[in-house]
Amino acid sequence: MSDKELSFEQIANELLANKVSSDPAELHGILCGMVSGGMSLDNQDWINSLSDFINTGEKFPAEIETLIFQVFEASCTQLLDGEFSFQLLLPEDAAPISERAQSLISWVQGFLLGFGVQQEGQHSLSDEVKEALSDFAEIARMESDMPESEESEQALFEVEEYVRISAMLCFGELGKTGETDLSSFRTIH
């Protein structure tokens, strides 16, 4: 997410304050998985599925729904950009490496969930997408307890970059742009 967007910490605080049982990484992963798995950007029914996944089926409070639509819009804009501007919503680099690794795992788990929901009864996937999803399943089982070292930092960076590029690959192959102008997404005040 860009500097103009809410930070991981701000989103985490809002979710926690509203008793939503998800973290920003998982939320972002689910949203990106849904659109990368073929959900039309015109479809706004996803908010109901999302509440089933992370809010025990309860309707989101208005401020959380607005926040979620902001994250969704920013994610779609980045995926559609074509300039590789897409970024995973993860804690800042100053956060402990184990926290960042756990957030990456949560992001990947969310992506697999969102992608899987869109793939029920869908067409076959390319070998590249199948490989990426298989790798995501391995990453989802990765140990998050990592020592604070340059080697660990480099390894985590490489996995994050692989996940970022692979998510763009999935979106590039299966994502549907729809005809909706992203600025027209419903916002609740």
Image (cartoon, rainbow, N blue to C red):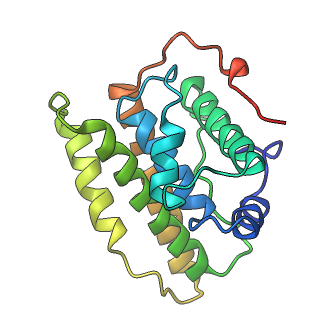
What residue appears at the point 20 percent right and 30 percent down from the top-left corner? 122
- Viewer-nearest residue: 147 or 103: 103
Relative side of 52 to 92, left or right: left
Q: Quadrant of residue 81?
A: top right
- Viewer-nearest residue: 100 or 154: 100
Q: Quadrant of residue 33?
A: top left
**Image height of 65 relative to 12, above or below:** above
- Residue furthest to the top in view is 179
Observer able to see residue 164:
no
Observer able to see residue 46:
yes
**Residue 59 screen position, x and y as percent:** 60, 50
What residue appears at the point 42 percent right and 21 percent down from the top-left corner? 176
Quadrant that contains the C terminus: top right
Relative side of 109 to 148, left or right: left
**Residue 17 screen position, x and y as percent:** 76, 68
**Residue 82 screen position, x and y as percent:** 55, 24
What residue appears at the point 66 percent right and 43 percent down from the top-left corner? 71
What residue appears at the point 51 percent right and 79 percent down from the top-left corner? 151
Q: Quadrant of residue 49?
A: top left
**Image height of 176 relative to 1, above or below:** above
Picture mark count: 0
Relative side of 57 to 18, left or right: left
**Image height of 16 relative to 2, above or below:** below
**Image height of 36 relative to 14, above or below:** above
- Viewer-nearest residue: 162 or 121: 121
**Residue 43 screen position, x and y as percent:** 49, 24
